[in-house]
Amino acid sequence: MSKADKIFKEMCKDILENGTDTKDEIVRPVWTDTNEKAYTIKKFGVVNRYDLREEFPALTLRKTALKSCMDEVLWIYQRKSNNIHDLKPHVWDEWADEDVSIGTAYGNVVGEKFEFKGEQIDQMDYVLKQLRETPYSRRIMTNLYQFHDLATGHLDPCCYSATYNVTKDAATGKLVLNMVLNQRSQDVLAANNWNVCQYAILLMMVAQVNDMIPGELVHVIADAHIYDRHVDAIKELLGREEHPAPKVRLNPNVKDFYQFTTDDLIVEDYVAGEQIKNIPIAV
C-alpha cells in the first residue's frame, strides 16, 4: 500500500487529536463565499519524509493531478512566470490582478538576477550550476521568501525554500540528490499531496539532468492546518482504502531542465479513491 497514504493519515490524525484550535484567535483567512473568518485546527512543526527510491509519494485515497502539479512547478522554476495565463491549472486565479499577474511572487522571484562570482544568474540556474560544478556543496538552495518582494506580491510564498543535498549510493557509487522543502503554512486537505508531488517531480527533473538518483524529499511544515469546513472530508479520507503507489517516471531522453514538458511525465497504474469535489478555499 502507498506509504504516502500512511503518512497522510498519521499526520491528519495527529492534527485532529493533538492540534490547536484557532477559533479564539485573530485569524486572517476568510471564506470566499461568505467572507466569514476561516478557523483551523493546526499543528506546529510537522516533518514528513518520502524516499523516491522506494515509490512515488502520490496519495491513493484520492487522486492527485500529477501533470497539473508538474505544470505549476514548470511555471515557477522553468518558465519563471507570474502570469496565470502561462499556467494550465487555475490554482492561482483567486490571487491574480486585472493584468492576470500574481505580482512579485513565485516565478518572478526565481527569475530575478543576482550577481554570483561576477556572473548575473537567477536562482534556478544557480542550483543547476552548483550541482554540476560543486555537487557536495551545502549551499545549494532556492528561497522564494525575499522580503523586498513581499509588498508587491499577491501572496507570501507558502512553499518558500528548497535545499538540495547530495549523498552517494553505497551499492552503485552514483550520486543521490535529496531535498528539504520548507513550507511556512499548509492547507492540508487542499494542498498537502499537491505540494509533495510537485516537489517530488522537481527533484526527479533536477536529478535526471545531473545524472543523479532522486532520493529523499523531507517536507517541513511550520503550520499544518485543517480548516473547520474540511474536517468531515478529512475524516472520510481517513476511512478510505489504500492502494499501491503509482509508477511515475520521466522521459529519460530529456537532459536539459528547460526542455521538460508535462508530456515527459509518465504515470502508470494509478488506482485511487473517488475525488472530493467542491472543496471550499479560504483566502
Image (spheres, helix red, strand yellow):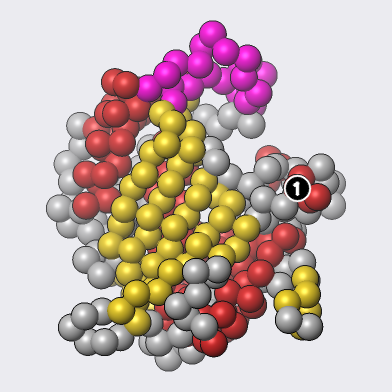
Q: Residue at x 38, y 55 (%)?
A: 218
Q: Give the position of the C terminus as an image quadrant.
A: top right
Secondary structure under tag 1 reads helix
- Asked whether residue 25 is drawn in magenta, I would say yes
> Residue 220, can we see it?
yes
Q: Which SS type dominates the magenta stretch?
A: loop
Would you identify the image quadrant in which residue 25 lies? top right
User: Does residue 80 appear in this view?
Assistant: no
36 vs 100, left or right, is left
Question: Residue 151 versus residue 98: which sits nearer the camera?
Answer: 151
Above or below, 60 against 280 in this view is below
Q: Residue at x 25, y 36 (%)?
A: 10
Position of residue 278 relative to residue 155, above or below, is: above
Label 1 CA crowd tier, 10 Å (few <14, some 14–19, many 20+): few
Q: Is residue 84 magenta?
A: no
200 up-or-down from 5: above or below = below
- Place of residue 173 in the rendered image (x, y in percent of width and height, measured from the top left): 26, 87
- Residues rendered magenta in the picture: 19-42
Q: Residue at x 62, y 58 (%)?
A: 143
Quarter location, residue 282: top right
Give me the residue at 72% from left, 60% from top.
109
With 8 as the anchor, is 259 left or right in this view? right
Disc 1: which residue: 147
